[in-house]
């Protein structure tokens, strides 16, 4: 199974934000979209990622001043990206290794989606359920 199969189900819409937007704006956007991360883009290129984790860290370190800080002051730089052709297992390993919950999906240098740990786990659970049902049917037919 590939990341493309996840994107086919969930869609390819990606919420983005500019590096010069405020952290407050990012938090508002996350809440409004009911998502956990925004891809930070500058001139159609991925500059980084801002998630709930960075926002909580900013408020913990800077208090109320975090509201008016800029996204570029708190975002993750050097974000690991994946391809639609990458396997779900590979992406699970990357997420675990890098300790991240969101990964932008890029094809030919263009942002084409984003996957979260929740997307990956849901997809894997569906695969396991299908495998279990097939095995159950094979077992029942063999009796």
Image: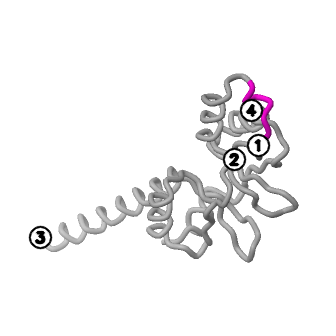
Q: Residue at x 74, y 49 (%)?
A: 15
- Comes first in the chain, label 3 or label 4: 4
> Measured along the vertical axis of the image, is residue 142 above or below residue 119?
below
User: From mark 1 to mark 4, how far is it between C-alphas?
Assistant: 12 Å
Q: Residue at x 35, y 58 (%)?
A: 129
Quadrant of the drawing holding the C terminus: bottom left
Give percent across and percent down for residue 14. 72, 54
Residue identified by numbered label 3: 143
Label 3: state its secondary structure. loop
Whether residue 68 is in magenta: the answer is yes
Label 2: state its secondary structure. loop
Whether residue 103 is in magenta: the answer is no
Residue identified by numbered label 1: 71
> Measured along the vertical axis of the image, is residue 37 above or below residue 34?
below
User: From mark 3 to mark 2, how far is it between C-alphas?
Assistant: 58 Å
Give percent across and percent down for residue 139. 18, 69
Give percent across and percent down for residue 75. 69, 47
Residue identified by numbered label 2: 75
Label 4: state its secondary structure. helix
Q: Which residues are magenta?
A: 65-71
Judged from this view, the residue extending furthest toward the front is 61
Query: Badges 1 and 3: C-beta atoms under 8 Å apart?
Result: no
- Comes first in the chain, label 3 or label 2: 2
User: From mark 1 to mark 3, how far is it between C-alphas?
Assistant: 61 Å
- Residue 3 picture quarter: bottom right
- Comes first in the chain, label 1 or label 3: 1
- Comes first in the chain, label 2 or label 4: 4
User: From mark 1 to mark 2, how far is it between C-alphas?
Assistant: 6 Å
Crowding around mark 4 (Cα neighbors within 10 Å: few <14, some 14 to 19, many 20+) is: few
């Amino acid at each position: 199974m590939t990341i493309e199969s996840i994107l086919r189900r969930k869609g390819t819409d990606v919420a983005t934000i500019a590096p010069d937007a405020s952290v407050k704006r990012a938090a508002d956007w996350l809440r409004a979209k009911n998502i956990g991360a925004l891809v930070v883009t500058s001139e159609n290129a991925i500059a980084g990622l801002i998630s709930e984790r960075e926002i909580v860290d900013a408020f913990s370190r800077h208090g109320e001043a975090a509201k008016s800080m800029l996204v570029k002051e708190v975002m993750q730089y050097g974000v690991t990206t994946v391809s639609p052709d990458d396997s779900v297992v590979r992406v699970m390993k990357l997420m675990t290794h890098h300790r991240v919950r969101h990964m932008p999906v890029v094809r030919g240098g263009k942002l084409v989606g984003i996957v979260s740990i929740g997307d990956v786990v849901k997809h894997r659970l569906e695969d396991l359920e299908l495998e279990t049902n097939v095995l159950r049917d094979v077992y029942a037919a063999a009796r």
